[in-house]
Amino acid sequence: MAHLEHVNITVANPKKTAAMLSDLFGWHTRWEGSAMDGAGYTVHVGTDDSYVAVYSGTAPEQTVPMSDASYSTRGGLNHIGVVVDDIDATEEKVKAAGYEPRSHADYEPGRRFYFYDADGVEFEVVSYA
């Protein structure tokens, strides 16, 4: 059976984004270094089984924050979903980090909320507990 290994996103500061993801979700840096183009930098942050590759190139247009346009743009990144054991504790961490949780919902089979990071990447936090 196949499983998702990673997602690669462009951010302004890979080290800062990796630190944020580690703080919020208890992840660790699996690898970091020069990007395959030799001009950028990438940090792989996640678990032993999967990760988010956070990349920054040298072209300024790569680091311009995006808007909700991803939902109407073919190929756009809509959000990254992260399953947590304790959604309330995670929401407190999100707030303490200066992000605004929104779009809360209780639904079968769990609970969720969303937030945007400093680069405009939307995260869905969900708990099935």
Image (cartoon, grey):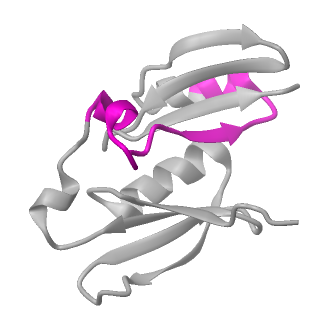
Percent from the top left, x then y, of residue 106? Answer: 73, 9
Q: Residue at x 48, y 58 (%)?
A: 18
Percent from the top left, x then y, of residue 37? Answer: 30, 87
Q: Residue at x 65, y 45 (%)?
A: 25
Q: Nearer the viewer, residue 53 or 73?
A: 73
Percent from the top left, x then y, of residue 93? Answer: 57, 30
Q: Is residue 1 above or below residue 25?
A: below
Determine the residue located farthest toward the left in the rendered image. 60
Asked where in the image residue 59 lies, by quadrant, the reply is bottom left
Percent from the top left, x then y, of residue 49? Answer: 77, 66
Quadrant (top left, top right, bottom left, bottom right) of the N terminus: bottom right
Q: Residue at x 42, y 27 (%)?
A: 99
Determine the residue located farthest toward the front in the rendered image. 74
Q: Nearer the viewer, residue 129 or 36?
A: 36
Q: Is residue 67 above or below residue 19?
A: above
Q: Is residue 96 above or below residue 35?
A: above
On the rendered structure, is 86 left or right of 23?
right
On the rendered structure, is 57 left or right of 122?
left
Q: Which residues are magenta?
A: 67-92
Asked where in the image residue 34 lies, by quadrant, the reply is bottom left
Total numbered circles: 0
Q: Residue at x 52, y 13 (%)?
A: 103
Check residue 59 for magenta coloring.
no
Quadrant (top left, top right, bottom left, bottom right) of the C terminus: top right
Check residue 69 for magenta coloring.
yes
